[in-house]
Every structure is written in C-alpha cells, then in structure tokens.
Image (tube, helix red, strand yellow):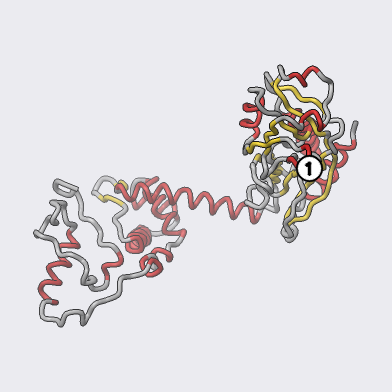
C-alpha cells in the first residue's frame, strides 16, 4: 500500500497481548523495509517495545505463537444481533435511522457496532457528519452478513413451518411420463405443501447431502440411514445414435450390445457390465452427467442402457431409444431418512404407486 492512508487501520485483536519476539520492527517510523506503509498501531507497538523491553533478559518474556483456535476465539463470539445492526446501519445510512429500524437506542447501535469491530479487529464503517459508508473490508463483511442472516431466516422458517415445503430429489430423470401427473395431482390434493423437484447427481439423489426430503432412486440404496420402498417398475431401453445400424430394429437384445462400448455412470446409473454374462460383457466408459451421456452417444461411438424415464424426459435429435427385450425391468424406489421422515412421505408413496400402476 502506498500513499497517505485515508483513515486509521484498526489493530488486529491478536495484538492485545505483547508482541511475539519474532515480529520485526519497521525499518522506519512510517514504512517497513519494502517501502510499504506501516499501520499506526504497528508503529506505536514497535516504539513501545523499543522503550520498555530493551533491558529485559532475552527470551524471558517470549510468548508462544497463537494457534488457529486462539486466533479466532474472539471471532467465534459473533452474535446475530451484531450482524443485523451492521446491515441496518448500511441500509438506513445513519445510526439514528438504524436505531429506529431495530427498535433500540442510538447508543445501543453504537455499542453493538463497536463490539463487532472489536471482535473482528477491523474498522467496518467510515463515519462523517453527513453519512456512514462501509470500508472495503466492511463491504465484504456486510455481503457475508446478509447471506448469513438470510440462511438463519430460512432455517427458522423451515423449522417452524411444519414442513410446508417438500423437496423430491432425483439423479438423471425424475418420474418419466409420470412426472407431470405427479406434480399436478399433488398440487390439487395437497395445496398446503409446495412440491419441488430437485436434480442432484449423487448416489442418494441429494438425500444424503440434505438437498431434498425424499429421493427417487433406480438402484438399491445400501445405507442404513435411509428407508426405501419400490413404487413401480420401468422398462430398460438402449440409447443409440439415430444412424446406428441397430436403430432400424424395433428392439434389441443384450447380446446385440456385447461387442459395443457401453457408456455408464457408476454413481447413479442403472446399468453396468454386470448385466451381461461374464464371457460376453461390453467394454465400458465412464460418464457423470446425463447431458454428457447423450452428447457422446449421439456421435455413434458408444451406446447406453437406461431406464424408460430417461427416454421420456430427454428426447434429443440424433438419439433414439429401443427396448432391451431380455433386460430385466428397473425398480423405481422412493427413499427417505429413517430417523426423520417427512410428514408427507406416506402420501407421496401412495400417489407414486398409484401412478405406476396406471397403464
């Protein structure tokens, strides 16, 4: 940093105790050995050390360098009221207006901001007789504070609302041809519970990550944290390029694909080479996203085997789907947390089971 500082730089909280011996004293009163501006608190502390510590025995009063836990101990005492106060001051423009918005006195606003600045060890706001504006650091802290407060508000709303939101996760395809009927019937039968379908390409379709409340899966879930139930079956289809020689057929067999390269998603996919006999398994390539899967298959270099729902949800030029006649059907499962099932779990189970039973 060069040039005259426009404002004093607040002393970090870890300088409340005597400086460790390894802290270098600036080469000049105002600049360090590299010519950089030295903050006022560093100059004062350095001079103080020169005046008061020169006659001490070497090493007698050395302190151990603080660990990460010690360094952030004060910061961990941050309170939501401090963040709300900072955001209110920035939004309202003055301490007086912020106090009115928060329903407290102006003195309380000043004390709360001062305690926040002490905890962080930085100056957050520039104050003049006419305005209050964030410092560079203050602007970053305000942005973080807004996100934290929004997350807390969402947490409180979610915890106290009685599960008025229902998130159903899926990996590649949701419910195929049943997706739209499921959404419409649910909204008519349960208008008090908002339904959201969430695509998460993970083994639990977002359930284990906390991204959803229920998950639609097409492979067994070997995790004791969850319960699951089969709601229906789907045909197994082969996806191939539209100019593939097999595309002229109405259906294919597993043996027809044995000499081809099979594109698979080992995390969430429904098909692996284990579907074939050990002596006639196709070569495989890995993929991790349905859009990439379709793009590679369209080149004609590979084929894919997937659930019927994929064909319903991902119709794409250059790709055709053919039933695999001797491929066993794919079980569609609904999964939920064993120790904390969503209140709507039973209703979703019943509706999905009914939809899959329809012709």
Counting other residues with Cα less than 10 Å from the Cα at mark 1, is it few (<14), some (14-19), or many (20 or more)? few
Give the camera-side residue of 96 and 7: 7
Residue in the image at 84% along x and 38% along y: 329
Give the camera-side residue of 293 and 42: 293
Residue 218, position in %: x, y? 76, 43
Against 354, residue 344 (above or below) is: below
Name the side, left or right, on which 16 lies relative to 254.
left
Q: Secondary structure at mark 1?
A: helix
Quadrant of residue 263 within the rendered picture: top right
Against 256, residue 10 (above or below) is: below
Q: Which residue is mark 1?
A: 278
Name the side, left or right, on which 217 lies relative to 33.
right
Quadrant of residue 76 within the rendered picture: bottom left
Residue in the image at 82% along x and 19% along y: 249
Give the camera-side residue of 258 and 139: 258
Residue in the image at 30% along x and 57% along y: 122
Position of the C terminus, as image quadrant, is top right
Name the side, left or right, on which 151 lies relative to 294.
left
Residue 8, position in %: x, y? 20, 55
Against 120, residue 236 (above or below) is: above
Name the side, left or right, on which 304 lies relative to 141.
right
Quadrant of residue 191 within the rendered picture: top right
Residue in the image at 81% along x and 34% along y: 236
Residue at far front of view:
279
């Amino acid at each position: 940093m060069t040039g005259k500082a426009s404002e004093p730089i607040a002393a970090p909280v870890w300088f409340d105790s005597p400086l460790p011996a390894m802290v270098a004293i600036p080469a000049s009163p105002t600049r360090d050995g590299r010519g950089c501006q030295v903050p006022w608190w560093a100059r004062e502390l350095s001079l103080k050390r020169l005046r008061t510590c020169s006659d001490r025995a070497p090493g007698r009063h050395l302190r151990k360098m603080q660990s990460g836990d010690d360094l952030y101990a004060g910061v961990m005492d941050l309170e939501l009221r401090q963040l709300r106060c900072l955001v209110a001051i920035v939004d309202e423009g003055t301490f007086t207006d912020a106090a009115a918005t928060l329903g407290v006195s102006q003195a309380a606003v000043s004390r709360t901001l001062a305690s926040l600045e002490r905890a962080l060890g930085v100056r957050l706001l520039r104050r003049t007789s006419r305005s209050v504006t964030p410092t560079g650091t203050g602007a970053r802290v305000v942005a973080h504070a807004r996100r934290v407060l929004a997350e807390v508000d969402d947490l409180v709303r979610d915890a106290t609302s009685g599960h008025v939101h229902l998130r159903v996760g899926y990996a590649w395809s949701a419910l195929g041809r049943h997706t739209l009927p499921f959404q419409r019937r649910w909204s008519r039968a349960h208008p008090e519970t908002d339904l959201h379908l969430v695509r998460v390409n993970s083994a639990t379709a977002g359930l284990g990550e906390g991204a959803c409340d229920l998950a639609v899966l097409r492979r067994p879930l070997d995790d004791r944290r969850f319960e699951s139930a089969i709601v229906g079956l789907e045909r197994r289809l082969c996806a191939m390029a539209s100019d593939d020689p097999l595309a002229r057929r109405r259906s294919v067999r597993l043996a027809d694909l044995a000499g081809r390269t099979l594109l698979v998603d080992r995390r969430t996919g429904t098909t692996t080479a284990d579907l074939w006999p050990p002596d006639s398994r196709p070569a495989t390539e890995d993929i991790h996203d349905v859009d990439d899967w379709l793009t590679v298959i369209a080149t004609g270099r590979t084929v894919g085997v997937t659930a019927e729902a994929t064909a319903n949800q991902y119709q794409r030029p250059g790709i055709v789907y053919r039933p695999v006649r001797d491929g066993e059907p794919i079980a569609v499962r609904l999964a939920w947390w064993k120790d904390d099932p969503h209140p709507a779990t039973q209703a979703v189970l019943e509706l999905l089971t009914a939809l899959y039973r329809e012709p």
